[in-house]
Image (spheres, helix red, strand yellow):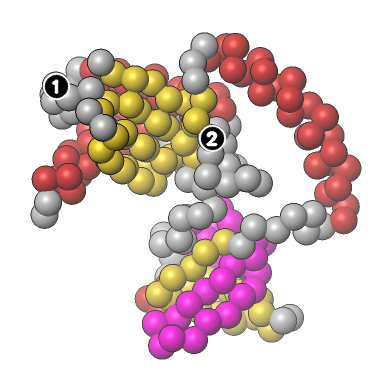
Amino acid sequence: MSAVDGLTSRIQHEVSAPLAALGLDLEAVELTPAGKRRVLRIAVDQDGGVSMDDVAAATREVNQVLDGSDVMGEQAYTLEVTSRGVDRPLTLPRHWRRNSDRLVKVTLRDGSSMTGRIGDSGEETVVVEVSGIEKLLAYDDIDRALVQVEFNRKADTSSDLDEAEEHGEEMGDDMGEDMGGDLDGGTDPVDGIDGEETEKH
C-alpha cells in the first residue's frame, strides 16, 4: 500500500462514523497534490440524494474531525466535499437502488455490454430492462456500470424542470450567501450538487 493509499484509508476511518451520524454514506476519499498544498476531496451520498445543506453539514463535520486529528499532518490542504455524482461507477447494491429507473451502461466480465434501465435491485442481483426485455444480472458478473446522463427523458417532467430552473438562480444565491465561502462545481451537470470548499493553512 502506498503512502497516499494509507493516508486516504486513515482519513476514511476518521470521517466515516461522523458522516454516518448525519445519515450520509462516505463514497470516496481522494487526496491529490496541488503545488505546495494538497486537495482532499470527499464524496458523500444518501437515499433521496444530497442537498446543499447536507454538503454544508458534512463539510463542517469533516473539518471538525480533521481539526481534532493529526491525520493531515502540518502540510496545508483544501477540503472539497461533494455529492457522489453519476460519473462514478455503480459498485455497491445501494448505488443501484438509488439509481432505480435510470439508464445504465453495463459491461460484463465476459466482455459483452448492454444499455438499459435499472429495475428492482437486491443485495446480489439487479434487473436491467434492455429493449423491453428484463435481464437479471448478478453483481459478481458485472465488470463496470455507469449511469448515462439523460436530458428531458420524460415529457411530463418538463414543467418541473422549468420550475426548477426558474427558482434555481435565487436558491443558489441564497445558499452562497449563507455559506459565505467559495463553492466548487459538482461533477454531474444534471444531478450533481455543488461542493463546499475550505482551505486549511
Of residues 171 and 27, the one drawn nearer to the viewer in this rendering: 171
Whether residue 192 is visible to the viewer of this picture, yes or no, is yes
- Confirm whether the magenta stretch covers residue 24: no
Q: Which residues are magenta?
A: 94-122
Three-letter amino acid code at disc 1? Answer: Glu
Which residue is pictured at 45% across the width and 22% down the height? Answer: 57
Vertical comparison of 62 with 191: above or below: above
Q: In the image, is residue 118 part of the stretch drawn in magenta?
A: yes
- Relative to 38, 144 lies left or right: right
What is the x, y in percent for residue 7? 16, 40
Q: Which mark is residue 88?
A: none
Q: Is residue 47 visible?
A: no
Mark 1, Cα crowd under 10 Å, few <14 / some 14-19 / many 20+, is few
Residue at 56% x, 28% y: name it.
52
Disc 2 secondary structure class: loop
Image position of 21 (left or right of 129)? left
**Which badge, 2 or 1, is on the more N-terminal residue?**
1
Label 1 element class: loop
Would you identify the image quadrant in which residue 101 lies?
Answer: bottom right
Q: Residue furthest front?
A: 35
Amino acid on which disc 2 is placed = Gly
Q: Is residue 1 above or below residue 108?
A: above
| Residue to which mark 1 is pinned | 74
- According to the picture, the residue beneath numbered tag 2 turns out to be 185
- Quarter of the figure with the N terminus: bottom left
Do residues under tags 2 and 1 come within 8 Å of each other at their CB atoms?
A: no
CA gap, disc 2 to disc 1? 27 Å
- x, y percentage for residue 28? 35, 46
Residue 29 x/y as whole percent: 31, 42
